[in-house]
Amino acid sequence: MSTGTIRSQRVTALLVTSLTLAGLVGCGGSSGGQAKPTATPSVAPTVGPTPIPPRAGAGVESEIQSVDIAADPAGQIVVTFSLTDASGVPIQPVTAAATSDQQGRVRFTIAHVEDYSGGGEFGGEFDRYVNDLDATRPRYDTNGTLETVDAGAGVYRYVFSAHLPEGADLSRTYSVGLQVDRTFEGVQLSANPVFDLVPAGGTPMIRAGSTTAACNTCHDPLRLHGNRREFRLCTLCHTQAATDSKGTPVDFSVMVHKIHMGVDLPSIVDGPPGSKYGIFGRSSETVFAEKDADGRITGVAFPRPTNECTTCHTGGVTSDYYKDRPAAAPCTSCHDDINPSLVATAAGPPGTGHFQSKGFADGDCRLCHIAAEQQEFDISVPGAHVVPEQSTQLAGLNIEIAGLTNHAAGETPMVSFKVTDNAGQPLRDLAGLNRLAFAVAGPTTDYTTVLTPTAVGGGASGTLAGPDADGTFTYTLPAPVPAEAIGTWSLGAEARRSVTLNEAGGGTRTVNEAAVNPVVTFVVDDSAPLARRVVVDDANCQSCHGEFSKGFSVHGNLRNQTQYCGLCHNPNASDVARRSRDMQAVAAGDAVAPIDFKFMIHRIHTGENLTHKPYLIYGFGVPPTNYTVIDFSEVLYPGDRRNCDTCHASGTNLLPPYPGTALGTQLGHLDPSTGKEIVDGRLGPVTSACTSCHDSDAAAAHAATQTAPNGGEACAVCHAEGRDVSVSNSHLHPQ
């Protein structure tokens, strides 16, 4: 209501009062005459317009403010919650599918924490969630009622249709989970708050063996069953007694382990063709790992060591349960060829593959599988899961490139370097290394030439001398820098040694210990130094893969820095050296696979989403073939590939700065008569990067029509920053 309207009402009120008083005075009369009544005018109240509530904009925010579990009526569950957009504007909750972007669908479930004994001689105690709506086929509540508490603040109340059973133990912890789904401007939004309480009073017991943040280091974001995103919401339905429609356990601690083990599950690796692990949904089965008739295993491949438990078990209030409370079900979800329990399982009768061929009660597991490591590789939970490449028995291996001389074009370089352990002590004898090699590549505008001399190991050449008094060696390369070389070049190094680790009980195991790959630059002429562009942040790779050479192995555990990878994986590189060893591929004149880093990495991570399959690269192999055919078509990327910052250093995927001086990917095929590569041409640099993910015929045709006969690309006309279909706009990453 405006100020003017308020003022008008006040004037009217005064007028009415004055006239009324005047009439009352007249009624008293004078001179004995009867006064006529004074008419009071009828004044209609002024009514302001009904305010229009603001429309909710982007985002969805929801919080469970309180939960009441009533004694009368017995077991009634009442939830008070808020629902707004990101700015606090209310959104209307509905229990069915939303019909507008001003609504959000809400669904509620409830579970309680139940203590139980693991049995056995030592009777270790455990706890678990039990869904109070259905213990074996957990679900959301249905037919509950919604009402508005405070429309202006977006506060509402939901009353469960289901009640807790009579006599329910209200001294337990109850956890209520809410799933909110809203679609705004075509983007699916979600909120999954969880509220914990002890109805009888007390501090709630929260079970959380991990966190959503831990999941999202790879999943970007976690989103399952349409739009469920929060770890704790998952645990309220994926409870210990829960199964799918075929009876397969979907208990979180079992299901998640088995899914992430995937292609490494012993039952599949060692099983017959047709072995698989899958879960049945409402109408179909999702298969997470399967062995084909030819013995090939496809499915989920965890991107780092599966025995690195703290990858997931971190940050949650009960993250230490994995080592504090070992039990048969979660342990054998990974080790599914062993049965340490007291009942028969798919692995066999009790004791299959276990100590003394005997099964035990869960309550006795931690008698042997204790929570604290006594010695690496012992049978404590952390000891049994030591990643060998992260063993504390490893002294560390480091290379420092101390100097480079004779590095002009046409000259033969001599490298000065030191190899040390993590304490800084130099190795004075390199005979313990099974490989020490260098890579020299240039120019840094984009690498086109690479030399890969070996100083120690198979195929060693050149001249190695030293060490001097402080442990510095010198190595003279076997070949000069090309006479036609110009500009700035790069020099990198790799080193590896085989180390024997001691195990508990007197056994040993062998592991390859690798050095971090150093890369330095040098100028081969009189030009100003030009550093190689940085495109990928190694820390981003490590968020999923862990530290390369510390568990995730590439090329025999030797290579671990993306700047080093680029020296060999340059725009001219292909798999010809290995593919040409396959006589069938040579006879067919196969196209070679480019291994240009920007092309290959995008295509590998696109994997199952590629239009053209299979995507094969010939890699290293053992005699007699000396090659291995690797099919990356089955790679299951766990995140959203539109989020380029997952891998890229900030902004390096945009136009500009890309392509700068970058070259496009070279294409070629095998000459059937010689097995050598015949170059067919070169993609433009933008086309190389973009069509490595967008590999459809339509995308290739689009790129071709925007490329001039001289190779010039018009991509920036539409896709540069500031344009309607800029790279950033085209790769928007809605959460």
Image (tube, grey):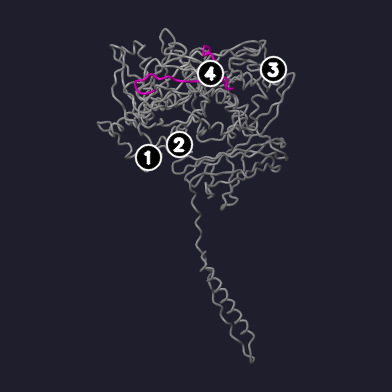
Q: What residue sits right under mark 1 in the picture?
A: 726
- Judged by depth in the image, the label closer to the viewer, 3 or 4, is 4
- Judged by depth in the image, the label closer to the viewer, 1 or 3, is 1
Q: Position of residue 425 (x, y in %)?
A: 57, 20
Q: Main secondary structure of the magenta part?
A: loop
| CB within 8 Å, label 2 to label 1 | no
Vertical comparison of 336 with 144: above or below: above
Residue 315 horizontal side relative to residue 534, left or right: right
Q: Is residue 287 visible?
A: no
Furthest-bottom residue in view? 31
Q: Position of residue 23 (x, y in %)?
A: 60, 82
How crowded pointer 2 is (Cα within 10 Å; few <14, some 14-19, many 20+) is rated as some
Q: What residue sits right under mark 4 in the picture?
A: 471
Name the foreground residue: 165 vs 429. 429
Residue 262 horizontal side relative to residue 117, left or right: left
State which region is magenta: 407-432
Q: What residue sits right under mark 3 in the picture?
A: 368
Q: Position of residue 593 (x, y in %)?
A: 36, 20
Q: CA distance from mark 2 to mark 4?
A: 39 Å
Name the foreground residue: 569 vs 367. 569
How crowded pointer 3 is (Cα within 10 Å; few <14, some 14-19, many 20+) is rated as few
Vertical comparison of 187 with 563: above or below: below
Kind of residue indicated by mark 4: Gly
Furthest-top residue in view? 624
